[in-house]
Every structure is written in structure tokens, then in C-alpha cells.
Image (cartoon, rainbow, N blue to C red):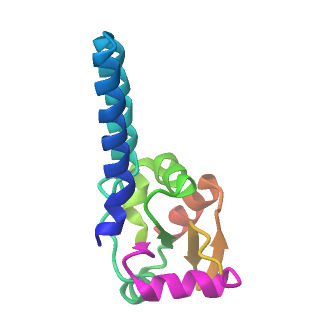
Amino acid sequence: MMRVWILPVVLVLGGSVGAAGMILAGNPAAAAVMLLLFVAFAGLNSPLIFPRPMGAVEAQRRSAADGRPVVFWRPGCAYCLRLRMRLGRRAGRLYWVDIWRDPAGAAVVRAANDGDETVPTLLVGGRPYVNPDPEWVREQLSRSA
């Protein structure tokens, strides 16, 4: 569970060290901007930006009942972040499975990707789709509604 916070913490610490160096060099305005950028990037890569993850078994059970897609993702993944941001508020209608928290979810992703943990991987109607276009995902959401 702590592994999901490694990247955000490293980003905040790195930004803090860089900002401290800039302050010591006599440039506090640039230090403030740099620290804000690092904190914002850490926030985007934190588990806070994604809907609450659930286990793969539960997500697949719910998906079978209502037809909504299941997204397998992991923190720090730029493609997962792109999908999440491009979906906007609609992202909350998907079932999100963090493969770093759920070994069953990681196994589903490896089975769909020849042993690789390539994310985001979506399950729509039981079929896996790797790194789909956000527009396509929106279409799938409108069909399941």
C-alpha cells in the first residue's frame, strides 16, 4: 500500500531540495514556482486523483452486472493519468483496479499482455484492450449507461 506513495513523496522531496537550493542562491520567487510545480505533479501522480480502487474480482463481478468497463492501472503511469484526465468526471463511472494493490488484478493484466503489466488495460465485456483511446472509452461508457 505504501508503494503507491513513493513517486509523489519523491517528487515533493525533490522539489523541496531544489527549492531550498534556489532560496540559498537568492532566488525565492523561482523556488516557490518550482516547488508548486513539483507539488502539483506529485498530486497528479498520487492515488488521490483516481477514484477509489477496488479488487479485480469485485470489479469484474460489478462489470458483468452493469456492463461498465474495468480499468487496470498503477500509480505513476503517464498513460493512466492521461486516460483519467481526458475522461474527466466520467472516470468515476469506471471500475478502477490498482494492480500494485491487487495481485489478482496484476494477474489479469499479465494474462492479457503476454506476461507484461502494461497499463491501462481495460476489460469491456470480458475482452481486454490495452491503452485505448479516451474517446473510445467514452463510447463504451455511453453504451453501458
State which quadrant residue 124 falls in. Answer: bottom right
Q: Is residue 18 magenta?
A: no
* Near-viewer residue (17 or 78): 17
- Residue 134 position within the rendered picture, expressed as x and y whole percent measured from the top left: 59, 54
Q: Is residue 88 left or right of residue 22?
A: right
Q: Is residue 28 left or right of residue 18?
A: left
Q: Is residue 101 magenta?
A: yes
- Residue 44 position within the rendered picture, expressed as x and y whole percent measured from the top left: 39, 46
Q: Which residues are magenta?
A: 97-115
For the point 35% across and 35% down, the residue is: 15
User: Is 68 drawn above or below residue 12 in the view shown?
Assistant: below
State which quadrant residue 60 falls in. Answer: bottom left
User: Is 118 drawn above or below residue 59 in the view shown?
Assistant: above
- Residue 62 position within the rendered picture, expressed as x and y whole percent measured from the top left: 39, 84
Q: Quadrant of the N terminus?
A: bottom left
Q: Is residue 112 left or right of residue 68?
A: right
For the point 34% across and 71% down, the residue is: 53
* Near-viewer residue (20 or 59): 20
How many marks overall? 0
State which quadrant residue 98 falls in. Answer: bottom left
- Residue 30 position within the rendered picture, expressed as x and y whole percent measured from the top left: 36, 15
* Near-viewer residue (23 or 99): 23
For the point 59% across and 75% down, the residue is: 117
Q: Is residue 28 left or right of residue 104?
A: left
